[in-house]
Amino acid sequence: MALRHELEDVEGVGPATAEKLRSVGITSVEALAVTPPRTLVEIAELTEEKASIITQNARALLNIKFTTAKDVLSKRANIGFITTGTKSLDNLLGKGIETQAITELIGEFGSGKTQICHELAVTVQLPVERGGLGGRALYIDTEGTFRPERIMNIAKGLGVDPDEALGNIIYARAYNSDHQILLVDEATNLIPANNVRLVIVDSVITHFRSEYPGREALAPRQQKLNKHLHQLLRMSDIFNIAVVVTNQIQSAPDVFFGNPNKPAGGNILAHGSTYRIWLRKSKENRRIARIIDSPMHPESECLFAITSEGLVDVEEPR
Ligand code: GTP
Ligand code: MG
């Protein structure tokens, strides 16, 4: 968003209300616009009427309303792309990882999900001419696998100052699923002020799977996961940023024909993500990426490799 608004710019928000909102962590108009009025009543002790009016006014200020297809098209013209550092993966996706969308990386252990996240955390910082968005990355790490040393190597490989690259990645470790959701809530305040153009959640599913084991827990788990994905999608849309999440593979014992493995997270993740990329290991450092379930792309595959300096193209032997 080109223009930054302060809370006081919202009709109905005076200095006292602004102060109250800030004290409970709602520090931007965007955050106000996406907070349910019910929550405002609870945490900021506003009346229901006031809460409802100011969230509506915040949305109006940000132009969140019904639009025509023409407006949708012109909004889509603002979509930005982040290079994966390889031509093959960029082509598979069209032009790279898109803003206003959730891209899901699926794959078994060691398939390269976390490596792609590291790569993108650096390439998003590149200027537009080099395939970046000249912005920062926000990295939400649920598994403790983020490695600054990797970032430095990737940065060097791209001719970016490693120190600068590290400084442009905002990092948070999420310790459980509630914390993960809370961090995304807080991100709403942080994104516009810090020129964040990419949010990574690696992995989006781990905490949900471990905290809600078994069939009985499936319904509440999926409900919460759904809320989380909507939160991410809304964020990608409002701020015109890219969201990248990673997901694991689970085996489906009831499948007798074809691939017995499927992405975890069920329909909620399948429908929540805009683009899904399935990664597989190939020989040595090579990986195969396949785009699945895409509304815009034919189902196709490509090859890339993981090196110490990040992702690279592979000349496909014929
Ligand atoms: P899980 O999180 O365990 O599900 O796997 P993942 O899909 O996130 O795997 P990850 O992205 O961590 O890929 C790990 C692989 O990347 C390793 O097996 C290595 O092949 C490769 N890799 C990681 N770091 C380096 C490095 O510094 N140099 C090189 N050459 N390869 C690396
Ligand atoms: Mg990983």
Image (cartoon, grey):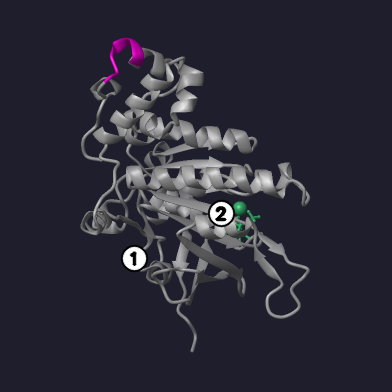
Secondary structure beneath dot 2 equals strand
Q: Residues within 10 Å of mark 1 (few under 14, many from 20)?
A: some
Give the vertical position of 143 relative to 173 (above or below): below
Residue at far bottom of view: 318
Give the vertical position of 271 relative to 198 (above or below): below
Nearer the observer, 274 or 51: 51
| Residue found at x 45% / y 79% | 315
Secondary structure beneath dot 1 equals loop
Total label count? 2
Amino acid at dot 1? Lys
Residue 219 relative to residue 155: left or right: right
Q: Mark number for residue 246?
A: 2
Quarter occupied by residue 136: top left
User: Do the numbered discs 1 and 2 sit on residues whose CB atoms are within 8 Å?
Assistant: no
Amino acid at dot 2? Thr
Nearer the observer, 49 or 37: 49
Q: Which is more N-terminal, label 2 or label 1?
A: 1
Q: What range is drawn magenta here?
A: 12-17
Nearer the observer, 103 or 226: 226
| Residue found at x 61% / y 34% | 178
The x, y position of residue 13, in whole percent, is: 29, 18
Magenta span contains residue 18: no
Residue at far front of view: 49
Q: Mark number for residue 95?
A: 1
Q: In which quarter of the image is the N terminus?
A: top left
